[in-house]
Image: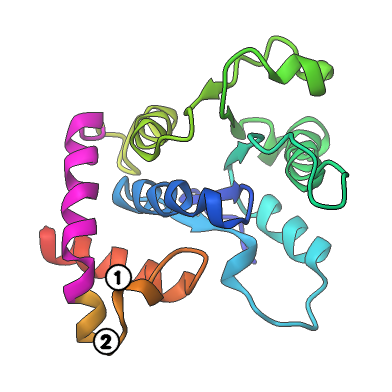
């Protein structure tokens, strides 16, 4: 997996409650002209997950990490995957050599001011809070990417939010074209199919 300037590694909770935010995240990155990289893009059971993550982080000069899952799970244990993958990205930036020194990392949380309580080493990193609102997440991700791959300013947050709303409205028709029911299309339900729908919508919109 070659390093590419458009790659954005995504590290988020993979659960049903996060699904609307994940869909908005995937849409925003793609609409801004960048390429999403996340563990869901490969389904090879023979590919060890850690190896996959290492390749994706190494190939991505930008990464987005959502640490909004701090509560205990059903097994009464916290979920460490997201902080672990953030640590890998920070390690790549610090120790990965010249090509990684300029890596850009965005940390998001659900609520402000809680991060130091459970990851005190990140004090001063100033994460952004999306309050579990997909539209606020669109704004945060847009502002993190800031410029298009050509260096031109991105469309404003309000424009991207309007475009995302239009995509959601047209998604059932896109699903029908490829013989899917609308409820079968989503970032977690069918990652690559959802990504195709996003790309197809954006291609037609332009």
Q: Residue at x 21, y 34 (%)?
A: 155
Residue 143 seen from this side:
yes
Residue 156 seen from this side:
no
Find out whether the residues at labels 2 and 1 contact each other: C-beta distance under 8 Å. Answer: yes
Q: Quadrant of residue 71?
A: top right
Q: Quadrant of residue 150?
A: top left
Residue highlighted by disc 1: 197
Q: Is residue 22 left or right of residue 197?
A: right
Q: Which residues are magenta?
A: 154-173
Residue highlighted by disc 2: 178
The relative height of residue 19 versus residue 112 in the rendered view (above or below) is: below
Q: Give the percent coordinates (x, y) of residue 160.
A: 23, 40
Q: Quarter holding the C terminus?
A: bottom left
Q: Is residue 3 left or right of residue 182?
A: right
CA–CA distance between discs 2 and 1?
A: 9 Å
Q: Residue at x 59, y 21 (%)?
A: 127
Colour pattern of the rendering: rainbow
Q: Main secondary structure of the magenta part?
A: helix
Q: Give the percent coordinates (x, y) of residue 181.
A: 31, 81
Q: Give the percent coordinates (x, y) of residue 140.
A: 42, 29
């Amino acid at each position: 997996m070659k390093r590419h300037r458009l790659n954005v590694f995504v590290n988020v909770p993979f659960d049903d409650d996060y699904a609307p935010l994940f869909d908005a995240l995937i849409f925003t990155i793609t609409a801004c002209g960048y390429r999403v990289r996340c563990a869901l893009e490969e389904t090879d059971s023979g590919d060890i997950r850690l190896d996959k993550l290492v390749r994706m982080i190494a190939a991505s000069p930008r990464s987005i990490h959502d640490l909004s899952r701090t509560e205990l799970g059903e097994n009464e244990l916290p979920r460490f995957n997201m902080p672990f993958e953030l640590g890998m990205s920070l390690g790549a930036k610090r120790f990965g050599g010249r090509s990684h020194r300029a890596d850009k990392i965005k940390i998001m949380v659900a609520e402000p001011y809680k991060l130091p309580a459970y990851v005190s080493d990140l004090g001063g990193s100033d994460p952004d809070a999306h309050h579990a609102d997909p539209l606020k997440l669109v704004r945060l991700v847009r502002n993190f990417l800031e410029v298009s791959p050509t260096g031109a300013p991105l469309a404003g947050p309000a424009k991207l939010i309007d475009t995302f709303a239009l995509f959601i409205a047209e998604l059932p028709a896109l699903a029908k074209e490829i013989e899917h029911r609308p409820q079968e299309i989503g970032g977690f339900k069918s990652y690559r199919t959802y990504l195709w729908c996003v790309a197809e919508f954006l291609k037609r919109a332009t």
